[in-house]
Every structure is written in C-alpha cells, then in structure tokens.
Image: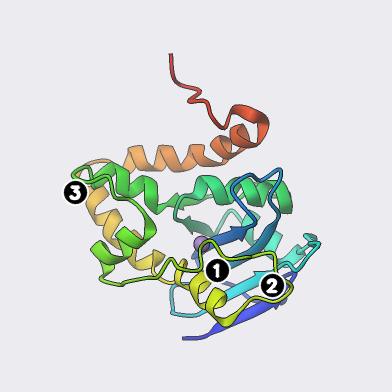
Amino acid sequence: MANHLHINDLPPGLTFGDIVAIDSEAMGLHPHRDRLCLVQMSRGDGDCHMVHFPPPGDYSAPNLRAMLADPSVLKLFHFARFDLAVIEHYLGVTCAPVYCTKIASKLVRTFTDRHGLKDLCRDLVGVDISKQQQSSDWGAEELTPEQQAYAASDVLHLHGIKEILDQRLAREGRAELAQACFDFLPHRARLDLAGWDEVDIFHH
Ligand code: MN
C-alpha cells in the first residue's frame, strides 16, 4: 500500500486496468468558482496515485485526460455527479463510462438514508474512514501527509463497495435501472455546469 503524488499529470504509461476508482478535491462545491486541486485514482490494489494541481493550476494533463476519456476504462466514483462536473470544467473531458456507488446504494439500500462514503465503507466493507481533512485547504502549494492519506482513503475502498452493490443490484433486479442512471450522469453534470444545478429537469 503506497500513495504516489504526481504534479500536474500522470506519468506516461501508467494504467489502472479495466476499472479505476476516482475522486477529486476542489476549493469548494461550485465548479465555476472553485478550482480543481487534486485527482486521486486507484486500481483497487491498495495503491493510490494522486495528481496535484498546485496554484494557479495547469490543467493540460494529457495523460490524465486520455485515461479519463478512455471508453474501455470504467470510472468508479462516489457521488460522480460532482466529480464529473469539475473534471469536465477544468480538464475539458467528458468522463465515461461511469459507475456511482452513491446511486447504486440509493437503489438497493432503501432501508436507510445514509449513503455517504463513510457509511458505505463501514456498513459494506467494514472500514472506518476519517472525514477530518475533508474541509482542509486543498489549494495549498503542498499537501500535508494527512491530506494525502485522507484523499487516498476516498478511492481505496470503492472497488470492494462496488462488488457488494453489484450483488445487491442483481438480487433486487435493479442493475439495468442503475446502468441507465450511470449513463445519464455525464449529462447531469453538464446540466449542472449549464445552470440547471438546482433544478430537477424531470420535475413537473
Ligand atoms: Mn474526497
């Protein structure tokens, strides 16, 4: 288990297999206002690769962008909607195909309204992750070891969570519905960026 910190892009030739777990950290929750600071990735083997964008932010990142846009690699997120909007806005790529553990959880864990990553880690894979660094200053020139460890913990367990959620989706007959939701996610992120972020476009 190791964390690898890269500046501004992935090194050439680094691949993540068929399914890559991804998360991002930004200066806040408004993509038009809040700069993208970090993208974390794992192939599910306990290692995390992080691409840090120190201020002011050079987002050319050709290797990272190629991986995100690669149609043969499934991108696994928790609450993909936000990450997809930030990635689209700063890196200029539509990230697809996508899987979202939060949506899968909402479709099968209907007995609870606790669908946070911390809840899924605890309830599905028995791991207690700390959310202490969530609100730290991700815009710093250098990230602290605590920030890096926190950032890694957000992607290290997504493969295990997906495996269990896939079993539940099959059990409840909702795999197809989940897939339709995942397929819509890049469009949902574009609606957010285009100004429909507070609107349920399907509402009456
Ligand atoms: Mn995170």
Rendering coords of residue 23 (x, y %): 53, 61
Task: Name the mark on residue 140.
Answer: none
What SS does tag 2 mark? Answer: loop
Q: Is 169 above or below relative to 153?
A: above
Amino acid carrying label 1: it is Met
**Residue at horizontal 37 percent and vertical 70 percent from the top:** 129
Mark 2 touching mark 1, by CB under 8 A? yes
Q: Secondary structure at mark 3?
A: helix
Q: Earlier in the sequence, mark 3 or mark 1?
A: 1
Name the front one of labels 2 and 3.
2
Q: Which residue appears farthest toward the bottom when viewing the image? A: 1
Picture colour scheme: rainbow
Dot 2 amino acid type: Leu
Q: Assess whether mark 3 and mark 2 are in contact (beta carbons under 8 angstroms).
A: no
From the image, tell me which residue sits under label 2.
10
Q: What's the residue at 54%, 61% (across, down)?
A: 135
User: Residue beneath label 3, please?
Assistant: 171
Q: Is residue 103 left or right of residue 170?
A: right
Calculate the distance from the C-alpha at mark 3 to the C-alpha at mark 1: 29 Å
Residue 199 % position (x, y): 52, 25
Between disc 2 and disc 3, whose residue precedes? 2
Query: Rounded to the nearest whole Å, what is the CA distance between mark 2 and mark 1?
Result: 10 Å
Question: Which secondary structure lies at badge 1?
Answer: strand
Residue 194 horizontal side relative to residue 167, left or right = right
Where residue 41 appears, x then y in whole percent? 55, 68
On residue 41, which mark appears? 1
The residue under label 3 is which amino acid type? Answer: Arg
Task: Judge: label 3 CB < 8 Å from ligand 1.
Answer: no
* Residue located at (78% from left, 65% from top): 55
The quarter holding residue 167 reads bottom left
